[in-house]
Amino acid sequence: MSLTTIRVSEADFNPGEEIERLIESSPEAGGVASFVGVVRNRNDGNDVTHLTLEHYPAMTERALAGIVERARARWDVCGVTVIHRVGEMAVGEHIVLVVVTSAHRREAFEACEFIMDWLKTEAPFWKKERTPEGERWVDARESDEEARRRWGEAAR
């Protein structure tokens, strides 16, 4: 059985519990790859105290589901979990979790990286950082676009 969990929420999550939940639902899996993104204290040379993420409800979940479908079409994965927080978060708090299980490690690693690269450019999230100097919106990075393009697929 193939399991997909996609959740967008203000609530924090426990990466270890989420990884274990996916492993338990994927007994055929021999490999598990995960990525956890957290709020860092500096960006573009400036101190950051908080990060606020905004999104379009329902549209965001559809975009994430589409990204997962693309990964599933490319790799033979057993299960996928994508959790993304929205709202205000302090330095060190979790932002995003991507977990992929597969029969073999290579597919799990590549599918996890693919999902994260596409999420960074194709999911409708907007970031605002709070710094000691005030708030500022964070622009998209060309390096994120390059990471997505390396997979050899055009964005929809």
Image (tube, grey):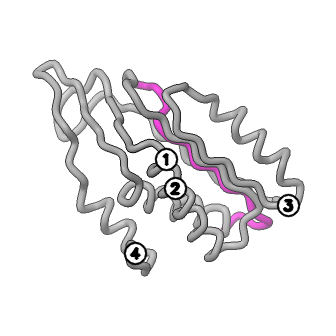
Nearer to us in this view, 63 or 108: 63
Above or below: residue 67 compared with residue 124: below
* Residue range highlighted in magenta: 92-106
Q: Quadrant of the C terminus?
A: bottom left
Report x, y in % for residue 30: 81, 60
Residue corresponding to mark 1: 58
Mark 1 crowdedness (10 Å alpha carbons): few <14, some 14-19, many ≥20: few
In what element is the residue under mark 3? loop
Q: How many discs mark residues in the rendered view? A: 4
Q: Is residue 61 magenta?
A: no
Query: Quadrant where the N terminus lies?
Result: bottom right
Q: Residue 102: say if magenta.
A: yes
- Image position of 133 with respect to 81: above or below: above
Q: What residue is pinned by disc 3?
A: 1
Which residue in the protein does label 4 denote?
A: 150
Query: Which residue: 61% across, 47% down?
Result: 6
Estimate the x, y position of residue 111 in percent, counting from the top left. Answer: 60, 65
Give the crowd class for mark 2: few <14, some 14-19, many >=20 residues within 10 Å: some
**Residue for badge 2:** 62
Instruction: Tell me if label 1 and label 2 are in contact, CB under 8 Å.
Output: yes
Q: Earlier in the sequence, mark 4 or mark 3?
A: 3
Compute the Cα span from label 2 to label 4: 23 Å
Q: Nearer the viewer, mark 2 or mark 3?
A: 2
Q: Upstream in the sequence, badge 1 or badge 3?
A: 3
Q: Is residue 138 above or below residue 146?
A: above
